[in-house]
Image (tube, rainbow, N blue to C red):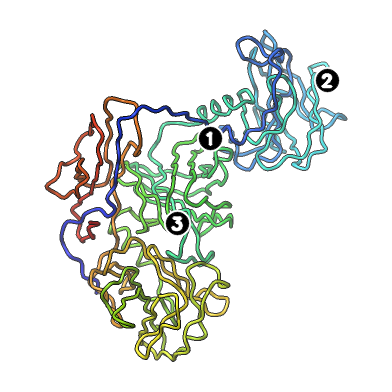
Amino acid sequence: MLKISRQHFIRNGVIMLTITALICGALLMSLMSENIKIVNQDPDVIEPDGTSAIHALVIHEIMSSNQGAVADPQGNTYDWIELYNGTSRDIDLSNYGLSDTKNETKWIFPKTIIKAKSFLVIYLTNTIMHGLYANFGLKSEGEETVVLRDSGGIIVDQVDVPALGANWVLARNNSGIWVILDQATPGFSNTVLGFDAYITSITKERGTVLITEVFPKNSGNFTSTLVELPGYIEITNTGTLPVNLKNYSIGDEFTSPFQWGFPSINLEAGQSIVVYTSNLNRKEGELHADFSLSAQNGYVFLSDGTGHIIDRVDYKMLPNGYAYQRNNEVYEASAALSPGFPNTISGITSFQKTLKTPSGLILNEIMTNNNTLMKHNGANAYNWVELKNNSSAAIDLSEYTISESFNVLNAVTLPKVILEPGAFIILMGSGYASLSTSMYHHIDLKINNDESLYLFKGQQLQDCLFAAGLKAETSYGRADEGFIYMNNPSPKAANSNGVRAISIAAVSTVESGVYDRTSITFNLLSGGNVYYTTNGSTPNTNSNQATNSITLSKSAIVKAITVENFTCGFFVDE
């Protein structure tokens, strides 16, 4: 049984915030401006107020491969065509026609007025629908001509559409020149500012359905039945009423926030749902999105059934193997995962119970900062990993390999040892098998902090683990119901008397740096009580408590810890 100690725990990872009172300047640049491909514009054909120099009714923007860039008011992602009225008068489009060929008019506008200097978006559905939904579509391969005719059948504008990549658009710049862009701007000018305005227009205030956990890079934390090492996004209904997720969507880029749509699923009050980011596109049973998240730095968007972004998470410098979890309005990085469950010790435990221990050879315990145990070769201590035969038959270790990466080509072969059923063996991760003695086996793999280990049999992954943030003389290993951290390692014995997670540092609202101010004010955010010092000393529960904002009027080094009352104790990072 897992024994839980009842005591305070102190958040691991002391944060440091250096504030220096020197004068400096900063230049902030838009992230969006890095990707947009706007050609140079002739200043002589741009109006004095910076608006478009187009003075006619024109086809203005076309998307023929909408893979989540734009959603209609019902959350559907159709291809679309945008018109722009560059005249100074409103135009009645009734009985105007639109088509993808010069030979016939396929769709007639309903009673529609396009205002002067305004845009109008028509969605292409390939079926008959009411409203501004045309009954034809476009091929992403191009070789089609979009034609706009007036009520008398006269061609008002036409354009030959080239091949367009996913979420790219054919668009006129302010000079009226056609360019290909990778940022859509329906309803706005085809510029960087137009794209910013578009994103702002489809963003609503955060509601009750939220992104509560993001896990970009699986570093051996767990395996899935369909994909060996998936990432995931967790969505939670924090409200009091059920919500149907039909036409809700998630995405990982500004240019495709509606990339993957949810099926019709009722999310009960307080319930969480997990979508694995595996590129599988599976909408029955275990949900899998058709994209994967960027490691360490990225975005996650959540949109509702009206085509609006209702939540967004930006993660930066997130270590591989860590999730970005929402706790009390604060997002924290943690290697203690809880997909589908609350981001608490109880939730972590519940998730651990869902993980099945493999049969056969398993990774049972690891120590990444060993200075005292099992000294040999001149009283040297080495980091180590423990294997266990979790089967009823003897196992030849030389049939297995072990690696720090999910690549069997980088794996090293285990020694020629027969491990009996239920038996343990310690392998020293010195990086030199030649250091082996009659008592201890070494392997040609060096075990380090925040360690991923992958055990292979042939080309097949047999087992894996990710041990994060281990302090000196502590270990991480399998217990009866999942993995635990142990203050007292137990080589060649069953693992018990540990805790589920090592906690993380408080988060400062101001980054370390140099500031051109007479004072600076910031907050230290965490899920528990934060204690801090400003003289560089190590804080404890007798230090100042960060119950309000902190103001500094001179250079300082701020260190902080978080202390929470839980049913289990966490380690102190000293």
The CA span between labels 3 and 2 is 56 Å
Q: Amino acid at mark 1?
A: Leu
Q: Is residue 485 above or below residue 292?
A: below
Name the N-terminal-most of marks 2 and 1: 1
Instruction: Please name the residue that numbered disc 1 is placed on.
Output: 31
The CA span between labels 2 and 1 is 40 Å
At a point 28% along the width and 46% down the height, the residue shown is 506
Residue 185 is marked as none
Mark 2, Cα crowd under 10 Å, few <14 / some 14-19 / many 20+, is: some
**Horizontal relation, residue 205 to residue 533: left or right:** right
Give the farthest residue toward the left: 542
- Residue 7, how many percent across, how many down? 15, 59
Mark 3, Cα crowd under 10 Å, few <14 / some 14-19 / many 20+, is: some
At a point 20% along the width and 46% down the height, the residue shown is 529
Q: Quadrant of the N terminus?
A: bottom left
Name the N-terminal-most of marks 1 and 3: 1
Instruction: Please name the residue that numbered disc 3 is placed on.
Output: 320
Instruction: Please name the residue that numbered disc 2 is placed on.
Output: 155
Give the farthest residue toward the right: 103
Q: Amino acid at mark 3?
A: Asn
- Residue 470, how many percent across, how many down? 31, 64
Q: Is residue 217 above or below residue 509?
A: below
